[in-house]
Image: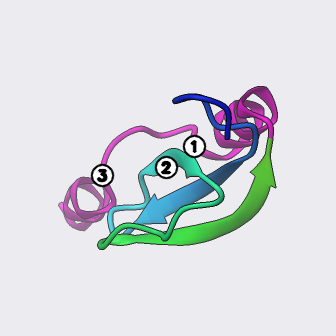
Amino acid sequence: MSGDVADRWAVLVNHEEQYGLFPADRAVPGGWAPAGFEGSEDECMAHVDERWTDLRPFSLRRAMAAR
């Protein structure tokens, strides 16, 4: 990393199936898990944009489907 800007990012996902980016050279923070993709910030954002099409948390989607 140079300064505060990561050169390589990791896509993470939490238990609510929400995505985030985190510097790939750092330990994954609690509550998050690797989503299996690393790359530049732009590559990671494109990956997230392709997969995270419903921004509602998983628990809300499940509750709405149960109604």
Which callout, 2 or 1, points to the residue nearer the camera?
Answer: 2
The residue type indicated by label 1 comes to Trp
Mark found first going from the N terminus, 2 or 1: 2
**Secondary structure character of the magenta stretch overall:** helix
Query: In the drawing, does residue 44 fall left or right of residue 60?
Result: right
Asked if the stretch drawn in magenta spans residue 32, the answer is no
The residue type indicated by label 2 comes to Tyr
Mark found first going from the N terminus, 2 or 3: 2
Q: Mark 3 points at which residue?
A: 57
User: In the picture shown, does residue 56 fall above or below 58?
Assistant: above
Q: How far apart are marks 2 and 1 (CA)?
A: 7 Å
Residue at image position (76%, 26%) is 42
Query: In the drawing, does residue 24 fall left or right of residue 67?
Result: right
Query: In the drawing, does residue 4 fall left or right of residue 60?
Result: right
Range shown magenta: 40-67
Mark found first going from the N terminus, 3 or 1: 1
Q: Where is residue 1 in the image (x, y as percent from the top left)?
A: 67, 41
The residue type indicated by label 3 comes to Pro
Q: In the rendered view of the protein, which quadrant contains the C terminus?
A: bottom left
Which disc, if any, is residue 52?
A: 1
Q: Position of residue 32 (x, y in %)?
A: 40, 68
Q: Mark 2 points at which residue?
A: 19
Q: Nearer the viewer, residue 61 or 20?
A: 20
Q: Nearer the viewer, residue 67 or 18?
A: 18
Residue at image position (65%, 54%) is 10
Residue contact at pointers 3 and 1, CB within 8 angstroms? no
Q: How far apart are marks 3 and 1 (CA)?
A: 11 Å
